[in-house]
Amino acid sequence: MLGRGVKRKRGVQEAQPVGGVDAADPNSASGVSYLQQRQLVLSLCLDKLQGCQIVQGCQIRTEPSLHRSVLLVNTLRQIQEEMRQEGEESMTLTAAAALAATGPLPAPPATPLPQIISLACGAQASLPPSPPQDLFDLSGLDSVSSLLTCPGCSEEEEEEEAELEVSLVSSAFASSATSTPLLTPGDPASSPDGRPSHSFHSLLGSFELVNSPGYLSDLALDDIFEDIDTSMYDASDVSSILALGSSRAASLASPLSGLDDGELKVGASCPSSATLQLCFSEVSDLDHIMEVLVGS
Amino acid sequence: MAGAGDGDDEVQWCFSQVKGAFDDDIAEADIISTVEFSHSGELLATGDKGGRVVIFQQDPESKSQPLCRGQYNVYSTFQSHEPEFDYLKSLEIEEKINKIRWLPQKNAAQFLLSTNDKTIKLWKISERDKRPEGYNLKEDDGRYRDPSSVTALRVPVFQPMDLMVEASPRRVFANAHTYHINSISVNSDNETYLSADDLRINLWHLEITDRSFNIVDIKPANMEELTEVITAAEFHPHQCNTFVYSSSKGTIRLCDMRASALCDQHSKLFEEQEDPSRRSFFSEIISSISDVKFSHSGRYMMTRDYLSVKIWDLNMESRPVETYQVHEYLRSKLCSLYENDCILMRCVHEYLRSKLCSLYENDCIFDKFECCWSGDDSVVMTGSYNNFFRMFERGGRQDVTLEASREVSQPLMVLKPRRVCAGGKRRKDEVGVDSLDFSRKILHTTWHPHDNIIAVATTNNLYIFQDKC
């Protein structure tokens, strides 16, 4: 499996000896194909987890399968863990850390940048019939970059009704010489955050059925934000994000007060689009890197 | 079993019947979601995505039949579950019948349990072939007579009438499951049964609908720590205190209800150590157990994961005693089976949004195949893709791949063994792996409890095969 959009020719496949070097075989001796497959599986995982939202956008409103979600999340965690370990290893190997994103990747090991997006599997209220377009721009691997934009934020007027929220978790694992952690504008030398991502809580949390009617009143606003990983941001950026986020939380709390799932936590934590634009001025760099990765 | 007509005591499977239309355009409501023979084998029940249950009854044997066994004909059809709406979560609850389990027959009526994602119902199926006539206060059509017009008394008598089969819901067991019910299993005590969802197992009494006991709960306090779900559960066929449940990580836990009220601590844990050389991104997904079934004897149990069927001896927890590969040739295709729907989703999203729902359900690697034992526990059977199904003789002696297809739909036609070519030169009659149709899959199969009759469900057709006699 060389990558999406690239079909293996049937003749090539049949010519390969059984048990020989096979791009689809994860135990293949070739490191490049393993990493490419891992990247593919990673993006597939994200697509599938996000797929719940697409399907719900088409008004199929049954609850997504918990079994399937757990398996996908476990696969993501496994890949995440692997990448984190590789990141730590390469950190110790290359003392002088990151350069800005430059040209084509050299030979392996190339560690792609997983922007693990935490997805709220929109389990509650009715969904807007036409979801914001940019969330579902899934053409090629650029999908990962387009997923970075929060849909609820880009349409300010729909904020209060936008139950599909994407909260970005900044787990950047890469610090190899060839790539830049994209969530640190102007700080390429920062070390990657080794903590496992808390990105899945909102997905699995959406399956939580909270029974107590006093849930919202028990909820401290600070709790909503305590799992946002802000180590990648400067202190000044952090305060501005949180200020905007909490004001949104306040405005969101009232219309959604009838619902008491974990969704609210995630929804409220999404900062405004302006702030996101500020943080993700490197998005175009990500596009460039992704294109390079796909091409190699 | 490898070749037709090998030995005298080889079983040769013949086509017997097929139910359902052969349309190319399949209505989603007609997709069969469960199949189950009754304890005597006389009745065969199917459930579909539209929430309907169809019961077939076997005709009594007669010498005039071309096949030595009676045919199955429609006995009763009823709407078991309706779609519902969960107002708390603003989600639809599908009416699809996930499982049907028959109760052992105690009197003239038949009882079965049917379940969708949230609610279990006990249905009574009874026959009526007599009708009382000659009431004094009522006309025969039901209208009441004026008492003053009655001048003489008569004794009402039963008169024969055309057979009518009535299905009536006797119990509704609702509101006990937060997650989707995947299994129900009737206890050997004939008084209780269990229902299992992704995180919990409840014990019910058949007479009591307003409460159930929770006997297994694997929900973590913090949902973000969730890594494993329950995929199937079953009571032991003879020991009313014993049940097993399987998980998405490929483990099976056997629990004894005498040990404690909450069976979170297992009595036995069955798990096979993974071969580290075969580890891949999909290892966990394909190790997820989709079905677990005790043998009729109660000594063994069978589990089905994505690529294989394993037979476990209840006395040995460390590894299965037998493992059969169902479609090992798919191992190298796991990535594409995982990817299968994503590319489609992307294309279709641009043009045909409305079809996304059915394609979304198409990720093959998450398909849940069931498995079943023959009546004497000597053969096990499970489904595969391309409308193939596989039978394995115990003791690893022989196995065969058969196909449920329109081409073999004349009575007495013998099913020819099929072969899949995994690589290399493809022989005549073999099917190449890349030619397999992954949209035609056999997930549900059931074996007659006493006889060599099997029922195999393709997407919307029910095939009944029997051995040549």
Image: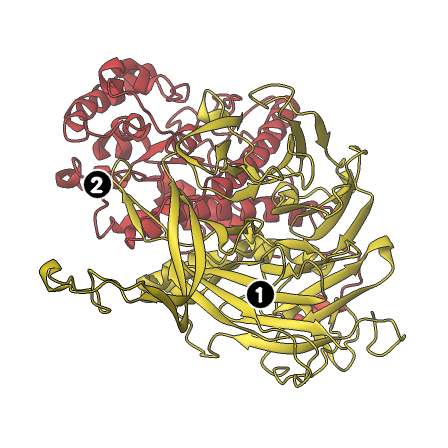
Residue A23 in view here: no
Amino acid of disc 1: Lys
- Residue, disc 1: A7
* Identity of the residue drawn at 58% across and 36% down: A79
Looking at the picture, tell me which residue is in the foreground, A198 or B227: B227
Q: Residue A232 carries which label?
A: none
Q: How crowded is mark 2: few (under 14 residues within 10 Å), some or many (20 or more)?
A: some
Mark 2 sits on what residue? A154
Tell me which residue sits at (49%, 51%) in the image. B112
Percent across and percent down for residue B396 are 85, 56
Residue B273 visible at all? yes
Name the image quarter holding the N terminus of chain A.
Answer: bottom right
Distance Cα–Cα, label 2 vs label 1: 36 Å
Q: Chain B is drawn in which colour?
A: yellow
- For the point 35% across and 45% down, the residue is A146
Q: Position of residue B433 (x, y in %)?
A: 68, 68
In the displayed structure image, the side of residue B324 where residue B166 appears, left or right: left
Shade of chain A as shown in the rendered figure: red
Query: Quick check: A156 above or below B48?
Result: above
The residue tagged with tag 1: helix, strand or loop? loop
